[in-house]
Image (cartoon, rainbow, N blue to C red):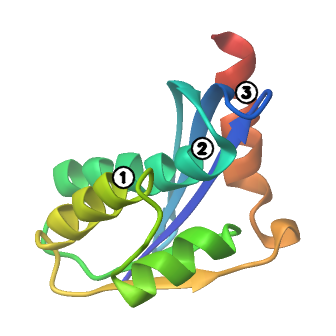
Amino acid sequence: MIEVYTDASTIGNPGPSAAGIYIKQNKQQYEYGVYLGEYTNHEAEFLAVIKALEICQKSFAGEILSIRSDSQVVVATVDKGHTNNLAFEPLLKHIIRLQESFPFVFYKWIPDKNNKNADRLARTALKRS
């Protein structure tokens, strides 16, 4: 199972945003920081998951993924597979499409203190933009 940690950093709401993705596969670790553009903090959290799934499609196709996020909104929305928020709907649909590349994708909410690597990567990517 591949452990995937995602986080987003946003200045303002909406404002410039970046995603941090930290991936653990056995003893290997992979780090990604991606500038996203202008988004709300919640949209950026969804986009962090999308970027993580896109990276995993290229590097870990066919693997079981455990995606960990400190965004309760993202985890709850993806677990339900439904949202009434019009801004989140296309993001959720994109996540659902990307998940089809994997046999199983699990989502787990984690506290901020357990997501420090992804947070660091997101903050660094935002500073570089």
| Residue depicted at 24% across the width and 63% down the height | 93
**Figure check: 38 above or below 95:** above
Q: Three-letter amino acid code at disc 2? A: Gly
Q: Residues within 10 Å of mark 2 (few under 14, many from 20)?
A: many
Q: Three-letter amino acid code at disc 1? A: Ile
Q: Do labels 2 and 3 touch, CB within 8 Å?
A: yes
For residue 124, the mark is 3
The answer to which of marks 1 and 3 sits earlier in the sequence is 1
Quadrant where the C terminus is found in the figure: top right
The answer to which of marks 2 and 1 sits earlier in the sequence is 2
For residue 50, the mark is 1
Q: Nearer the viewer, mark 1 or mark 3?
A: 1
Q: Nearer the viewer, residue 98 or 74?
A: 74
Task: Name which quarter of the figure residue 69 lies in.
Answer: bottom right
| Residue depicted at 63% across the width and 39% down the height | 40
**Figure check: 46 above or below 18:** below
Residue that carries the numbered disc 2 in the rendered image:
20
